[in-house]
Image: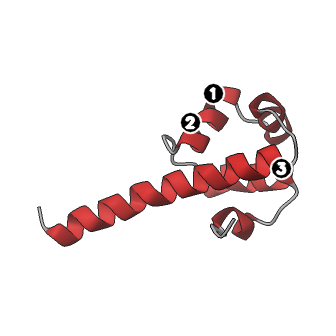
Amino acid sequence: MSRIYNYLIMKNDDLEKKLGAKIAYLRKSKRFSQAKLAEKADISEIYVGEIERGDANPTLEKLKLIANALNVDVVELFNFSF
C-alpha cells in the first residue's frame, strides 16, 4: 500500500476519534450520562459509547439525532477546536 493511502486511513481514524471526543465533551458539558444522551437521541447506550470511543461510524441520521439531543447544530459536532 502507498504512504498516501495509509495516511488517508489514519486521518479517517482520527476523524472518528475526534468526533467521538467532541460528542463526549458536549454530553459532559450538558451533564448528561451516556444513558441520558442515548434516551434523548433514541439510540442505544452501547452505541453512544462506541461513537465516543471512535469505534462506530454513525450515519448522518444518527448524528442529527445526537445533535438534536445535545441541542446543537450538526456542524458543531465537527468543530474540533474545544
Q: Can residue 59 be seen in this view?
A: no
Residue plotted at (80% across, 38% down): 37
Give SS at disc 3.
Answer: helix
Where, by quadrant of the figure, is residue 11 drawn? bottom left
Q: Which amino acid does label 1 sit on?
A: Ile
- Foreground residue among 3 and 58: 3
Q: Please say if 57 is above or below 6.
A: above
Q: What residue type is labelled 2?
A: Glu
Marks 3, 1: nearer the viewer: 3
> How many other residues sit within 10 Å of disc 2, few (<14), some (14-19) or many (≥20)?
some
Marks 3, 2: nearer the viewer: 3
Residue 67 percent across, percent down from the top left: 78, 56
- Residue 66 appears left or right of 12: right
Q: Which amino acid does label 3 sit on?
A: Ser
Q: Mark 1 points at which residue?
A: 46
> How many other residues sit within 10 Å of disc 3, few (<14), some (14-19) or many (≥20)?
few
Give SS at disc 2.
Answer: helix
Residue plotted at (80% across, 42% down): 41
Residue 64 percent across, percent down from the top left: 74, 56
- Foreground residue among 56 and 11: 11
Residue 43 percent across, percent down from the top left: 72, 35
Q: Please say if 68 is above or below 36.
A: below
Give SS at disc 1.
Answer: helix
Question: Tag 1 or tag 3, which sits nearer the N-term?
Answer: 3
User: Tag on residue 50?
Assistant: 2
Q: Name the residue under label 3.
A: 29
The residues bearing labels 3 and 1 have C-alpha atoms spaced at a distance of 20 Å
Q: Do the residues labelled 1 and 2 touch (CB within 8 Å)?
A: yes
Q: Please say if 82 is above or below 38.
A: below
Q: Are marks 3 and 1 in contact (CB under 8 Å)?
A: no
What's the image's color scheme?
Answer: secondary structure
Q: Quadrant of the C terminus?
A: bottom right
